[in-house]
Amino acid sequence: MDQRDADALLDEIEALGTKLGEARAAIGARIIGQDRVVELALAAMLSGGHALLMGLPGLGKTLLVETLSTVMGLSGNRIQFTPDLMPSDILGSEVLETAQDGGRSFRYIEGPIFAQLLMADEINRASPRTQSALLQAMQEREVTIAGQTRKLPRPFHVLATQNPIEQEGTYPLPEAQLDRFLVKIDVAYPDRETERGIILATTGATQSEAHRVFDADGLIAAQAVVRRMPVGDAVVDAILDLVRACRPGEPGAPDAVRAHVAWGPGPRAAQALMLLARAQALLEGRLAPDIDDVTRLAGPVLSHRMALSFAARAEGVVLDDVIAEVAGRVTRTAQAA
């Protein structure tokens, strides 16, 4: 990148940084005390990907998605996933219509998936057959109905909420679908002061309303800026070292991975880290990502793309601890280089 291009990119990043700051403020007016959750959700959208919000009911996941739809200026639809939901309830279907002259023809009625931001609420409550209806849409941004391929709106993002698998009436998401989510965002209980702010802000006579900051074209332009951001060789090497070290069959994998991990992340995890590290840098107004961005994103990017062995689960091993250990090792190696 020559100096002129670098200066132009810097100007775009600065302008976007101001706009993103306004967007975060608008979201923060309704979503109290979940700064990291908001940051990861925005990073996923800036990267052009999908996010899986993981947490117990009542922690504001649905409100976050609704607020993002308003602030980012996207047309949104919401699907409440239930065990009796069918694929046609998501994708749409053809219906036979009779005209006034007696002629009959099929007309396609679009399903709620034809939106720029789709909220898949409690996605793990639907059957695997219905969950799989999202696979083509999430990867290829199109759906095939009755042999005809139909393009989805641009941009297209799925923000899904999920209850913990241990709850009754849920179906684990298949690994192929989990891999389509760029990032998994854990939504935890708020601390005491945050919870105080929540109850004071949401139980009064008036409540904060979100306002639009971006629009669809503005988000697409921001996504283009993310892909133009330069990435240093040291960051690329850190991404590769991290992803490959989490595969138990990889030469040089740490003992913790070999002993406890059943299967590790594929190349899509490295792609996700590359994009999200750039988006993280953009959100902080930096021209390029650094190794700290990679290690901070290790858990959200890798935790749903790996699985512990049965023996490790029986021993009480925590996957996030294994990922943190590998990420720390990558950081130390990079600092020593």
Image: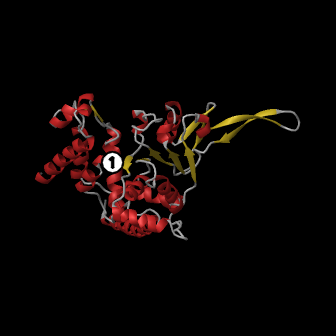
Q: Residues within 10 Å of mark 1 (few under 14, many from 20)?
A: many
Q: How many marks?
A: 1
Taking the image as shown, residue 3 lies to the left or right of residue 217, namely: left
Q: Nearer the viewer, residue 75 or 83?
A: 83
In the rendered image, which quarter is residue 23 located in? bottom left
Residue 13 vs 324, above or below: the answer is below
Question: At which x and y percent is residue 267?
Answer: 32, 38
Q: Secondary structure at mark 1?
A: helix
What colour scheme does the image use? secondary structure
What residue is shown with label 1?
A: 300
Residue 205 vs 221, above or below: the answer is below
Residue at the location (39% across, 62% down)?
195
Residue at the location (25% across, 40% down)?
318
Residue at the location (31% across, 59% down)?
1
For residue 23, say whether it is visible: no
For residue 191, say whether it is visible: yes
Q: Amino acid at mark 1?
A: Pro
- Most distant residue in the left direction: 336
- Most distant residue in the right direction: 101
Q: Nearer the viewer, residue 35 or 109?
A: 35
Question: At which x and y percent is residue 200?
Answer: 45, 68
Q: Nearer the viewer, residue 225 or 137?
A: 137
Question: At which x and y percent is residue 255?
Answer: 15, 35
Question: At which x and y percent is residue 306?
Answer: 31, 37
